Structures are given as C-alpha cells and as structure tokens.
Image (cartoon, rainbow, N blue to C red):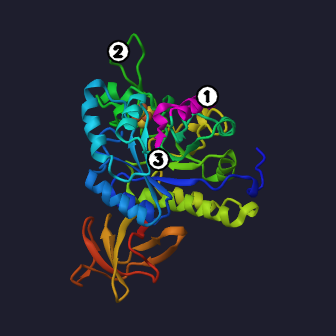
Amino acid sequence: MKIPPLENRLRLPELLAPAGNLEKLKIAVHYGADAVYLGGKAYGLRNLADNFTPEEMAVGIAHAHHRGVKVYLTVNSYPGNQDLPGLETYLEEVAPLPFDAWIVADPGVLQLAREIAPQRVLHLSTQANTVNWRSVRFWQEQGVSRINLAREMSLEAITETARKTQVELELFAHGAMCISYSGRCLLSSVMSGRNANQGECSHPCRWNYSLVEETRPGEYFPVMEDESGTFIFNSRDLCLIEHLPEMVASGVASLKIEGRMKGIYYVASVVRAYRTALDTMAAEGDEYRFRRGWLEELCKTSHRGFTTGFLFGQPREVGQEYHSAYLRSHQFVGLVEEIHPDGSATVGVRNRIRRGDLLELMGPGMRCATLRADEIMDEAGNPLEAANPNSRIRMALPSGTAPLDMLRREA
Ligand code: SF4
C-alpha cells in the first residue's frame, strides 16, 4: 500500500491503554498513554481483573485528567433481563463521574446510557462486532461517537470505512487475539462454566489438547507439537507496531492496546514502545522509519509470538502458535516507588532481587540504563543479600530515575 505524505494524513491517532486497576492506570499515564479504559466491578467484561470501585474511578479520573489523559468506562457486557435493574443502579451511581466516554456494546445498554446520562459521549465496543462501513453508519446514526472495529477487518476495509463514515474509528494494535470470531466463543462456558461474553473467560484456547477418534471414546492420543503437547486453538498475539504508517494513513483515530488483565510491566513496556514510535513519527514525518528496538522491547514482555492478525488478510497458519510456552526475554523485578533527597530510591520488589544482579532500569520514552545491584538495603538501611517479592528495598539508581520507573533483568 502506498503511504501518502504525512501532511496529507490525518493527525496521529490517540494511544489508548488498558487500566485494570488504579496502579495500572498510573503506569499507563506515566509511560505515555493519551487515554485509558477501565471497568467497574461488573458490566464491563474482564470481571476477573481488579477493576474499580466508584471511589477509585474518581481518583483515577482526577489523576489522568490532571495530566491531560482521557478516561473511558467500559460497560460492554450483554446483560440479561435479570441484570437490568442492577445495571441501571450502577450507571446512575457512576453518571456524575467525569468520564470522557462510556464504551457500550449492547443496544439496550446504549439506550439506558442515553436515558441516564444524555450528554455522555458513547463509544461502541469491539464486542458489537462492527465489520463494515454500513454498520459504522448505523451506529453513527444512533449517536455513537467512536467505534472500535472488529479485529477481523483488513487494512483495506478499514481505510474504505474511514472514507465513507464520519465517526472516529478505533483499532486494536496490540494484545491477545481470540481464536473464534470476534470473541464469540463458547469454549470457556462449556469447559469451565465461565462465560467469556460476561468477562469471565478461563482461556481454554491456550490449553493442551489430545486427539480422540469418534468410535473410541476415552482413548486419548497425544499430539506433540513440542514436549508439552499441542495447542491447536492458541492464537498468536496481535502486534502492529511495524505498521503504524499504514494505520495512520487509514484514518483511524485511536490505537488500542488490549490487556486489562495483564500486569503493570506489560502495560509499561507496550505503552512506551508504541508511544515512542508515534512520537518518532510525529518528529520525523516522511523520514520516519521503524526501529527494531521497539519490537525487541515488546518481546521483553510475556507473549505468544506475534501476528498482524487480519490487517493484511486472513492470518491462516501464521496467526497460530502451536507451542505452549509464553515467550519472554526479561523478568520484571521491581517498581520504583520513591526517590529520596540523597538520590537513593525505594523499590517495591516484585520478583526476588539478589545482591550483584545485573538489572535494567526502564522509564518512559525508551529511557534505559543497565546497573548492577551491588548494594541493596532494607528500609532501615541494613545490607541485604537478597530481597523477596512484596518487600521494599533501598538502592542507588541512575540520576533521572523517577517514581513508577521499573527494574527488570534478563530471564
Ligand atoms: S477461550 Fe480463547 S478464544 Fe474463547 S473467548 Fe476465551 S480467549 Fe477468546
């Protein structure tokens, strides 16, 4: 696809990051998200993430807005009749909070949201499976301001849709993919009684499968893709960082990172890589070129191999990961909590740190430094040989280190 000169393209898209709890929201903001999305304790899918109470939402919105970052509330489950009274009470409770938008999927929820908060900007969730420009126009006529397109759309279809519609379009750029069509999947409900479409997926598509011949029930034949078995439903993770120019040229308004269930290290690493790529694009214009280091950064978090999904057509077998292992070259070991006047830092230990470990400090904008943990102390200043997870240590870190920077080491 020929990419038009930068001046002919629309402005750079927003970078939209997951905020599974208040700590993840602060991390997403620190590492450069333009907007975050979060859910309450119910009705927002991802019911197994920590999620937010209304009080935490208020704190999170204030934190983000103070730094010019938008906050969207996900209300994208498909409630049954029995859920409607509770949903109505919940929406009335959160209506006064100054969210920049609510993300809905179900038409009934959209109608209820309109009644309870007529001025609230509404976005349409990917759960609504919008796959063509006529559907986009339909939702546009319902007053929806932005539509998160289904992951099944190709770049060509996205570009055509942007040309034929006026609403903002949002596109998943990075994160887990479902093996089924837009997450319409019953595997989890059937195999573990946890309904994926109510946000409780137990991810059986990542499990190890055997072969059973129809007339021999109970006889399991192992199928070995690697020493752990076979993983016939296991999708690779979406990663479009190499294709930002094409996505910008397509006219999408927002690039979304999947992963409210993922940890703070994942959020930090992915946001900083995409933030840096987008900022570089803004700075370099038509001289922009992709840097391998950004992809290497993404490989330092846990993932299942990368795919471009449906962007350039059907992914077929290259979208599939037949091996069990989550890939990851680095391990997150600590979060910088405080910088003291003497320049030392308090670090919240997340994985065991031993004296002498070779560590990497990471901050926003791909700021990095390699250091050796020659001296680590407990909070009272006593020297330590090793620090365990969930403890706090004091140690010297390079100048310029800030709270919410992170420490990691090669796995
Ligand atoms: S089991 Fe896998 S494919 Fe099905 S909804 Fe869950 S993550 Fe998606």
User: Can residue 230 be seen at all in this image of the molecule?
Assistant: no
Check mark 1 vs ligand 1: CB closer than 8 Å? yes or no.
no
Check mark 2 vs ligand 1: CB closer than 8 Å? yes or no.
no
Amino acid bearing label 3: Glu
Residue on which disc 2 sits: 217
- Residue 43, position as x, y percentages in the image: 32, 38
Alpha carbon of mark 2 to alpha carbon of mark 3: how far? Answer: 39 Å
Residue on which disc 1 sits: 134
Alpha carbon of mark 1 to alpha carbon of mark 3: how far? Answer: 25 Å
Residue on which disc 3 sits: 258
Residue 264 image label: none
- Residue 61, position as x, y percentages in the image: 37, 58
Amino acid bearing label 2: Pro
Is residue 127 located in the magenta-colored stretch of the structure?
yes
Helix, strand or loop status at disc 2: loop
Give above or below for 178 relative to 173.
Answer: above
User: Can residue 57 be seen at all in this image of the molecule?
Assistant: yes
Q: Nearer the viewer, residue 151 or 377?
A: 151
Q: Look at the image and give the residue range highlighted in magenta.
A: 122-142
| Residue at image coords 42%, 39% | 228
Image quarter for ligand 1 equals top left
Q: Which of marks 2 and 1 is nearer the N terminus?
A: 1
